[in-house]
Image (tube, rainbow, N blue to C red):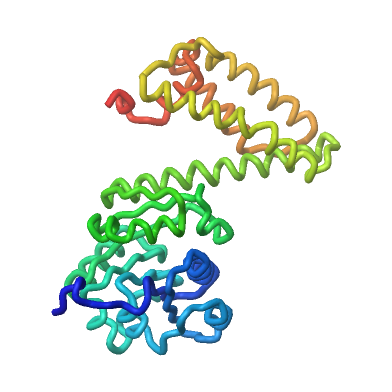
Amino acid sequence: MHDKKDETFQFDVSVIGLGAMGAIMSQALLDQGKRVAIWNRSPEKGAALVAAGAHLCDSAAGALAASPATIFVLLDNHATHEVLRLPGVKHALANRTIIDFTTNAQDEGLELQALINRAGGRYVKSLIVAYPRNVGHRESHTIHTGDRDAFEQHRVLLEGLAGHTVFLPWDEALAFSTVLHAHAFAAMVTFFEAVGASDRFGLPASKTARLLLDSSRFFLADALEEAVRRLEAQDFAGDQARLDVHADAFAHIARSLHAQGAWTPVFDAVCKVVQRASSMGYGDQDIAATTKSFAREDALEH
């Protein structure tokens, strides 16, 4: 087995899988001056990237051999195993790092890590918190787990895909990814609900959407910053606006929405959550104390 330091690579990185995300990752890396090798089962998908300077490999094994790190961006875990069973691939894994952006479960990722380790390679499981249009954006985030040393070795490369990177142990990475997406998508749906409800008041949806974005950007960011501060300091003093004040205001907002015939299941649920937190004895505390109604008893104190 050759030592990685003894190898000279023609390319900086390889990308296997040229769907929407894989193609944009490849282009982002090319735009940053990286030497990029690519492979896809349907080679015609790589035509635009080849025109932009990428090298199209004739096999998955060739793509692995071309670079010290290969990014997998495939349909699912089954597709990943199909690629790993292709001729020459397992042999080509030796002294290579697989950076796996393919969606899979934790047990599937751990199985892949063990398989790649047995073949002499290293495995980094990765998740980008961005739609394809924001690959390479300095404000985008990625979450990584698996082999920390391999992550650190390729950190600069990964920062080319998203300006912010974080490495977490397997269990923490899965947990954080789950709650992050629950938060982000709930926030999106709440926005869609508010924009849709605006039609009941005779407001144009497109105009309301822009007004909501502009008006809430600072307010929401500030509220979340304050919540983080309070959770870190365990300070839930109701010195800004008590939770029970919020509950009364929310009830008023809900009545106005319902009077117009708006269907607002998300905001209705928000009202119930705040009412429940108030009934649990947090009414005289800051709205951040609502967190306590979701967490295990005393969990926030640790």
The quarter of the picture where residue 187 lies is: top right
Residue 133, compared with residue 169, is above or below; it is below
User: Where is residue 32 shown, x and y percent of the image?
Assistant: 49, 64
Q: Nearer the viewer, residue 221 or 242?
A: 221
Q: Is residue 210 found left or right of 84 in the rendered image? A: right
Q: Is residue 241 left or right of residue 258?
A: left
Q: Note whether 227 is above or below 110 in the view shown.
A: above
Quadrant of the rendered image containing residue 219: top right
Q: Residue at x 27, y 77 (%)?
A: 8
Q: Is residue 259 above or below residue 21?
A: above
Q: Residue at x 30, y 72 (%)?
A: 68
* Residue 115 can be seen in this image: no
Tally of marks: 0
Q: Is residue 273 visible to the viewer in this orientation of the structure?
A: yes
Task: Name which residue lies at 62% across and 16% down.
Answer: 248
Which residue is drawn at the image coordinates 16% and 74% (left, top)? 3
Image quadrant assignment for residue 214: top right
Residue, far right: 202
Q: Residue furthest left?
A: 1
In which quadrant is the C terminus drawn? top left
Residue 78: give x, y in percent of width and height: 37, 74
Q: Quadrant of the N terminus?
A: bottom left
